[in-house]
Amino acid sequence: DTGVSQDPRHKITKRGQNVTFRCDPISEHNRLYWYRQTLGQGPEFLTYFQNEAQLEKSRLLSDRFSAERPKGSFSTLEIQRTEQGDSAMYLCASSLTGPIQETQYFGPGTRLLVL
Amino acid sequence: ELKVEQNPLFLSMQEGKNYTIYCNYSTTSDRLYWYRQDPGKSLESLFVLLSNGAVKQEGRLMASLDTKARLSTLHITAAVHDLSATYFCAGGLNAGGTSYGKLTFGQGTILTVHP
């Protein structure tokens, strides 16, 4: 399967702990996105990369959140000092860049529960 | 900032009936996407609409875009149980020929099709 993959699929942690999620995009896609989805809501944009460069960050992304894409391939999203409000599904998506359509293809998500 | 609103938020349909989901957005959006999400799963891309008057169809689903009215619709024809899912529309903004990348999602419409 050559779709977007995410690891882990589920994570339970205690408040105050740090967690890190990984996303592997579709191999030829140069853009990678992170979104957060809470129950009953649509995904909310967090940040995105074009190759290695982080081009935009949402104000939702507090200083406890950091994302990297060091070699322009996989990306990690780290949450430091987790809070109960961080409990959500974290979705990664990837796309090509072009003048026509740039459909974002989503991975299966990482479901985070902070106790 | 782009805002996207969908209605209805909940839709209960009988098999064989037709219905339409509406997606209104607040400012000019250069591209409009429709996604489907099954419970506990990630998002599946359905349609990308890039210009005023664009219409796309796949099976029992048809999506259209009216940029002047800032409205997109997803029309369901002769619904079947397999269409039960949550449907999201999302808008994106263009900047000089390349997308900003960020998508802004609506709240989602939970569609349930009954026999």
Image (tube, coloured by chain):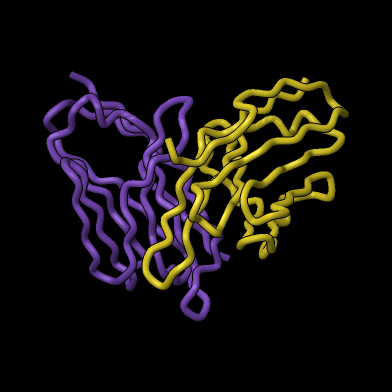
Q: For this rendering, which residue is in front, B42 or B28? A: B42
The picture places residue A7, in percent across and down from the top left corner, at 63, 31
The picture places residue A34, in percent across and down from the top left corner, at 61, 48
Tell me which residue sits at (50%, 41%) in the image.
A4
Q: Quadrant of residue A92?
A: top right
The picture places residue A25, in percent across and down from the top left corner, at 54, 46
Q: Note whether A97 is above or below A106 in the view shown.
A: below
User: Taking A35 as reference, is A107 left or right?
Assistant: left
The picture places residue A85, in percent across and down from the top left corner, at 74, 33
Q: Quadrant of the C terminus of chain B?
A: top left
Q: Quadrant of residue A88?
A: top right
Tell me which residue sits at (64%, 56%) in the image.
A72
User: Taking B82 as reference, is B6 left or right?
Assistant: right
Instruction: Give the letter of the purple chain.
Output: B
Q: Note whether A77 is above or below A45 in the view shown.
A: above
Point out the residue furthest to the bottom here. B96
Q: For this rendering, which residue is in front, A96 or B98? A: A96
User: Taking B38 as reference, is A36 left or right?
Assistant: right
Q: Note whether B37 is above or below B57 in the view shown.
A: above
Instruction: Give the letter of the yellow chain.
Output: A
Tell me which residue sits at (55%, 67%) in the image.
B100
User: Taking A79 as reference, is B106 left or right?
Assistant: left
